[in-house]
Image: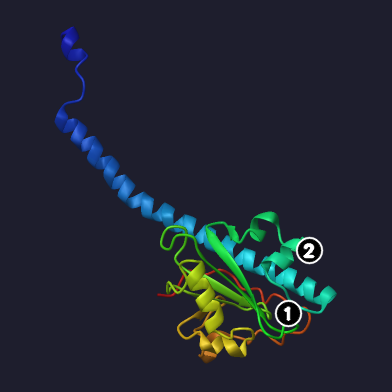
Amino acid sequence: MTRSSARRGFSLQEMMIVIGIIAIIAAISIPSLVASRQRGNESAGVAGLKAIHTGEARHREVHDVYTDLGGLAAKELVDAALATGKRDGFFFRVVVGPNAANQWAAFAWPQAWGVSADRMFLIERTGRVVMTTEQLVTDEASATSFASSHAFFTTYDLQSLVGWSYLDGGKIGSDSGGGGGGGGGAGGGGDPGCSLRPPGR
């Protein structure tokens, strides 16, 4: 074997084979990585809503009314990142009803649908979390419209969210949705222990 043949590099055909193998590996792994990141963001988004729920319960206990995200931030009842309304790939909005002593809800929607996450979530004062894959909210304008068009301040009023699912299982409006989450009360009924599950499509 000559010195020149011993140092021969990859041929074009060999390079194309290597590139093809890399492309196949990427095609298999990238969607899985994206899905894993989305699920992680969604878990964090739900955790953010539950932190808001805890903050609202504490605010109600001391001040006799619920408040918006700015009010929670002013009393240091949510962390600094959540107080901005933007965290872990989600935007957050808190809505207080006409009866501030008994009505509030919060929802979170993806910063980039299909990229940071593919579901939006809502929690009301009982601590029940519901979700949908419909892109009902994509920006602040649609968030305001969504907030003003639904009276979702109690478990009963969640029935207006047709097509949504309970995070702990079951479609809204069906008997398979599990327990109703209990009455509100000052503390909001506590956390029913919902666990994040893959979306039912």
Q: Are marks 2 and 1 in contact (CB under 8 Å)?
A: no
Q: Is residue 12 left or right of residue 110?
A: left
Give the residue number, with chain letter if any, for mark 2. 75
Quarter of the image where the C terminus is located: bottom left
Q: Nearer the viewer, residue 13 or 81?
A: 81
Q: Place residue 124 in its image quadrant.
A: bottom right
Quadrant occupied by the N terminus:
top left
Residue at the (37%, 50%) spot, across then down: 29
Q: Residues within 10 Å of mark 1 (few under 14, many from 20)?
A: many
**Which residue position is annotated with label 1?**
188
Separation (CA) of disc 2 from disc 1: 18 Å
The residue nearer to you, when weighing 92 against 23, is: 92
Q: Position of residue 13 (x, y in %)?
A: 15, 32
Instruction: In the displayed orientation, state which residue is furthest to the top.
Output: 3
Q: Amino acid at mark 1?
A: Gly
- The residue mark sitting in front, 2 or 1, is 2
